[in-house]
C-alpha cells in the first residue's frame, strides 16, 4: 500500500516582510498498519502510562498521534523506550505529532511509544494513534 503526506509550512521569518511557503511531501509504501483510539478514563492519575500497540508493524514509515483530550488534558509521549520524563515531550489538547519518512535502510524507525497522562483527568478523553510500516 502507498502512503503520502503533503502540505505546506507558511510563516513569516524573523525580520522578513513576506510569507515563506515551504512545501512538505513524503511518500512511502507499507504492508501493515495499526490504528487505535486510547480511552483515558475520568479520574486517571497524573503519570499513568498507556503503551501504544504497533501490531505487526516492525519498521515504521508513518506515525501520528492526535490529542483529542478536553481542555487541560496534556499528554506526554515517550518514543523508543526513552525514559520518562526526561526523554518525553508534551502535547496539548488538539495537538498532533507526526513523523513520516520514506522507506530506506538508513531510516531509524519508531519501534515503541508510550503515552503518559500529565494532569489528573476529571473527564473521559481519547488519544488517536496511527502507525504504518512493514
Image (tube, grey):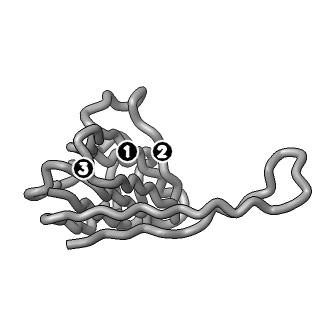
Labels 3 & 1 near each other (Cβ < 8 A): no
Question: Residue 132 at x, y = what percent?
Answer: 23, 61
Residue 21: give x, y in percent of width and height: 70, 63
Q: Quick check: 34 left or right of 96?
A: left
Residue name at image x 38 percent, y 56 percent:
100
Say which label, 3 or 1, has the lower sequence index: 3
Which of marks 2 and 1 precedes in the sequence? 1
Does 16 sit above or below residue 106? below
Choose between 118 and 54: the one closer to the eye.
Answer: 54
Write down the residue under mark 1.
77
Q: Are marks 1 and 2 in contact (CB under 8 Å)?
A: yes
| SS of the residue under disc 3 | strand
Which residue lies at the image location 47% right of the left edge and 57% below the top edge? 73
Which quadrant of the view contains residue 113? top left
Circle 1 SS class:
strand
- Residue found at x 20% / y 72%: 1
The span from disc 1 to disc 2 (Cα, nearest Å) is: 6 Å
78 relative to 60 in the view: left or right: right
Q: Residues within 10 Å of mark 3 (few under 14, many from 20)?
A: some
Residue 14 x, y percent position in the rendering: 83, 45
Residue 126, image x, y percentages: 35, 66
Of pointers 2 and 3, the one earlier in the residue sequence: 3
Q: CA distance from mark 3 to mark 1?
A: 10 Å
| Horizontal side of residue 49 vs 18, given as left or right | left
Report the residue marked by disc 3: 50
Q: Gap between marks 2 and 3, in whole Å?
A: 14 Å
In this rendered view, identify the residue nearer to me: 56 or 129: 56
Q: Residues within 10 Å of mark 1 (few under 14, many from 20)?
A: many
Query: Residue at 80% across / 62% down in the picture?
Result: 19
Label 2 residue SS: strand
Q: Select label 3 or label 1 by which is in front.
A: 1
Residue under numbered circle 2: 90
Amino acid at each position: 500500500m502507498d502512503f503520502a503526506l503533503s502540505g505546506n509550512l507558511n510563516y513569516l521569518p524573523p525580520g522578513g516582510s513576506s510569507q515563506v511557503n515551504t512545501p512538505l511531501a513524503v511518500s512511502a509504501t507499507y504492508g501493515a498498519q495499526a490504528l487505535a483510539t486510547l480511552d483515558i478514563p475520568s479520574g486517571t492519575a497524573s503519570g499513568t502510562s498507556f503503551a501504544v500497540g504497533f501490531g505487526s508493524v516492525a519498521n515504521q514509515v508513518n506515525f501520528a498521534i492526535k490529542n483529542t483530550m478536553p481542555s487541560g488534558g496534556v499528554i506526554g509521549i515517550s518514543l523508543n523506550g526513552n525514559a520518562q520524563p526526561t526523554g518525553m515531550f508534551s502535547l496539548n489538547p488538539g495537538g498532533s505529532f507526526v513523523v513520516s519518512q520514506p522507506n530506506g535502510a538508513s531510516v531509524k524507525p519508531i519501534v515503541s511509544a508510550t503515552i503518559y497522562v500529565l494532569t489528573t483527568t476529571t473527564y473521559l478523553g481519547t488519544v488517536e494513534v496511527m502507525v504504518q510500516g512493514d
